[in-house]
């Protein structure tokens, strides 16, 4: 099972305040544990929303909205992609995480859809196309 582990933004992360040396070191150790255990597939911190954009879809129309975005508590400051056996295991790993922000913070865990979750609508042809795409991504990332 794969889970997206989402670090919620706060006013400091949105203001571009960089983490302390201690937090960077603590996170580095935590990430090493995740990698050694075969849990971490990916993980990155994200720049503030002021450097981002959103694209709003309305039928065929696309509208670009430049950041920053107002609702800090709904923004993402970083993420991990975990591969674990259960949601409970993901929770246990996240509970071991250093607090990612000064003061209070929140981390959300969301399960990633797997091919079997889509049922009959995900036809054998669509599954083959998905597998080819994933193989191409892996090849691109190994270069």
Image: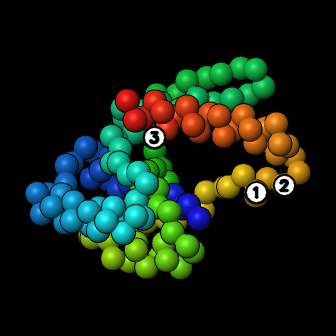
Q: Are marks 2 and 3 in contact (CB under 8 Å)?
A: no
> In the visual, does 45 lie left or right of 115?
left
Q: Are marks 2 and 1 in contact (CB under 8 Å)?
A: yes
- Badge 2 density bin: few <14, some 14–19, many ≥20, Cα 10 Å: few
> In the visual, does 48 lie left or right of 20?
right
Circle nearer the N terminus (2, 3)? 3
Circle nearer the N terminus (1, 3)? 3
Q: Residue furthest top?
A: 61
Q: From the image, tell me which residue sits under label 1.
A: 116
- Badge 1 density bin: few <14, some 14–19, many ≥20, Cα 10 Å: few
> In the visual, does 118 lie left or right of 36?
right
Quadrant in the picture for the C terminus: top left
Expressed as whole percent of the image width and height from the top left, the position of residue 109 reads 52, 65
Between 49 and 86, the one lying in front of the other is: 86
Q: Are marks 1 and 3 in contact (CB under 8 Å)?
A: no
What residue is shown at x 74% (from left), y 38% (from top)? Answer: 128
Marks 1 and 3, how far apart at CA:
35 Å
Q: From the image, tell me which residue sits under label 2.
A: 119
Q: From the image, tell me which residue sits under label 3.
A: 69
Q: Is residue 73 visible?
A: no
Vertical placement of 44 versus 95: above or below? above
């Amino acid at each position: 099972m794969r889970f997206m582990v989402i670090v919620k933004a706060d006013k400091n992360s949105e203001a571009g305040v960089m983490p302390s040396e201690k937090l960077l070191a603590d996170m580095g150790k935590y990430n090493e544990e995740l990698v050694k255990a075969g849990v971490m597939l990916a993980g990155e911190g994200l720049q503030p929303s002021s450097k981002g954009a959103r694209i709003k879809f309305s039928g065929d129309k696309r509208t670009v909205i430049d950041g920053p975005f107002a609702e800090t508590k709904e923004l993402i400051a970083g993420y991990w992609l975990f591969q674990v056996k259960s949601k409970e295991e993901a929770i246990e790993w996240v509970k071991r995480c250093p607090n990612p922000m000064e003061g209070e913070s929140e981390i959300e865990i969301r399960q990633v859809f797997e091919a079997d979750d889509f049922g009959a609508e995900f036809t054998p042809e669509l599954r083959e196309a998905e597998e080819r795409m994933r193989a191409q991504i892996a090849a691109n990332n190994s270069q």
